[in-house]
Image (cartoon, helix red, strand yellow):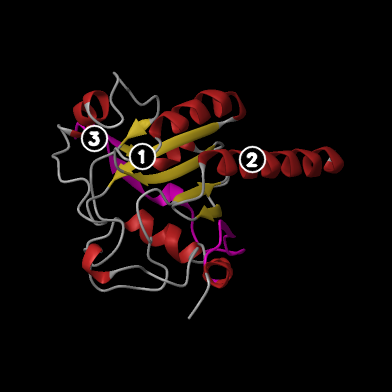
Amino acid sequence: WVSQFHLSLLRSFIVLKRTDCHAGVSGTIYEYGALTIDGEEYIPFKQYAGKYILFVNYVGKCPLPQLNALQEEFAPFGLVILGFPSNQFGKQEPGENSEIPLTLKYVRPGGGFVPNFQLFEKGDVNGEKEQKFYTFLKNACPPTSELLGSPDRLFWEPMKIHDIRWNFEKFLVGPDGKPIMRWYHRTTVNTVKMDILAYMRREAALAARGK
């Protein structure tokens, strides 16, 4: 018999809200790019050089209005949010690329919602056909949980320790193209916001000392 308290304690050991990415990672995110959700434009990520980039794999159930608010508030500080739909977690995003913006607008979250951040084509974030930039991000940052989850709800092979656990994991890349932090999928946007703000303040203080 295990009490709820002990279960919570156990989870706290195997789940981290945030992990810091490895220092000295070879390469940068600028070596990669992706197609926009309408398929009309390939955007090389070097287009965002000098900015902070937040990569998010999402579905309509995720708190996207909060991402809109974060993008609006932090755009003046050089933050760019990029969204990547995936159908690998519980098959929660079965729609075609052309259907996804309409679903966001009228169904989930609905209410006329339009993202103010760039959306990209639906694709794999784990497994044999995962997008190469996600391979780079995952290898650069430790996983946020020791557990992968229920295999019957995860749709990719082979499964690896660094894989994304569920929709709404977040990766922050710095102005030099190097990954900085990775957040667990259940970590709130507000927590992510405070972590990014603290990091930006530290960097600003270090830069001021160096002058």
What quarter of the picture does the C terminus occupy? top right
Give the spatial CA distance, label 1 vs label 3: 9 Å
Please check the rendered image and state whether residue 40 is part of the magenta-colored stretch, yes or no: yes
Numbered range of the magenta stretch? 14-42
The residue indicated by pointer 1 is 83
> Circle 2 is placed at which residue position?
194
Residue type, numbered disc 1: Gly
Viewer-closest of 5 and 211: 5
What's the amino acid at mark 2?
Met
Q: Amino acid at mark 3?
A: Ile
Label 3 vs label 2: CA separation?
29 Å
**Between 57 and 47, which is closer to the camera in this rendering?**
57
From this view, report whether residue 43 is shown above or below residue 65: below
Sequence-wise, the earlier of marks 1 and 2 is 1
**Of helix, strand and loop, which one carries label 2?**
helix
Q: Residue furthest top?
A: 112
**Is 14 situated left or right of 94 in this image?**
right
Instruction: Give the residue at x 49% y 59%.
Output: 27
Q: Position of residue 89 (x, y in %)?
A: 27, 56
Majority SS type along the magenta span: loop
Instruction: Indicate whether 177 appears above or below 96.
Output: below
